[in-house]
Image: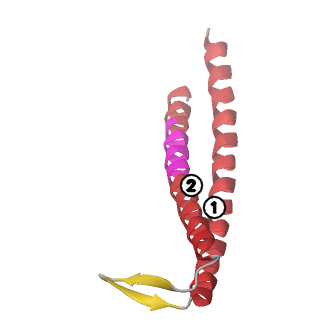
Amino acid sequence: MTQAKVNQLRLLQQNLQSVSTQKQQIQNQAIEIDSALETLEGAQSSFRIVGKIMIAAAPQKLKQELQERKNAVDVRLKAFTKQEEKLKESIEGMQKEVLEELQQKK
């Protein structure tokens, strides 16, 4: 029984690692968007890269699109944070169970 729980604990830790990596990527996207929004703040003109070309875009429209992306990224970030917290709680619980079983076997 303990071996099965140890395997389950490893799986939870791998899931936590994966979620943490994805969360970090989302955080990086949020930072990039914030930086772009800050840069656009006083801009008279702006450009957007489409494929391999750069085209002019209205700064206000670009700000709106970036803000929408930022909102979507924030929602994803909250979801990953909740998932990360639940995984941490599960890992802590599983670690306690494994330790208790190991101590009972001694």
Q: Any mark on residue 37, and which?
A: none
| Label 2 crowd bin: few (<14), some (14–19), many (20+), radius 10 Å | many
- The spot of residue 23 in percent (x, y) is 56, 55
Looking at the image, tell me whether mark 2 or mark 1 is earlier in sequence order.
2
The quadrant where residue 12 appears: top right
Image position of 19 with respect to 100: above or below: below
Most prominent secondary structure in the magenta stretch? Answer: helix
Residue 84 in the image: x percent, y percent? 63, 49
Residue 36 is situated, as x and y percent measured from the top left of the image, at: 56, 70
Of 44 and 30, nearer the camera is 44
Q: Amino acid at mark 1?
A: Leu
At a point 44% along the width and 83% down the height, the residue shown is: 48
Label total for image: 2
- Quarter of the figure with the N terminus: top right
Q: Is residue 63 above or below residue 13?
A: below
Kindly identify which residue carries mark 2.
Answer: 23
Which residue is at a point 58% across and 80% down the rendered structure image?
43
Q: Amino acid at mark 2?
A: Lys
**Front residue of 83 and 28:** 28
CA distance for labels 2 and 1: 6 Å
Residue 57 position within the rendered picture, expressed as x and y whole percent measured from the top left: 50, 90
Mark 1, secondary structure of its residue: helix
- Given residues 104 and 95, the one toward you in this image is 95
Indicate the secondary structure of the residue bearing disc 2. Answer: helix
Residue under the point 62% across and 69% down: 38
Q: Is residue 58 above or below residue 42?
A: below
Between 5 and 57, the one nearer to me in the picture: 57
Residue 16 among those drawn in magenta = yes
Q: Marks 2 and 1: CB-CB under 8 Å?
A: yes
Instruction: Report the magenta residues as a range.
Output: 10-21
Label disc, if present, on residue 77 of the rendered structure: 1
Q: Quick check: 49 left or right of 90?
A: left
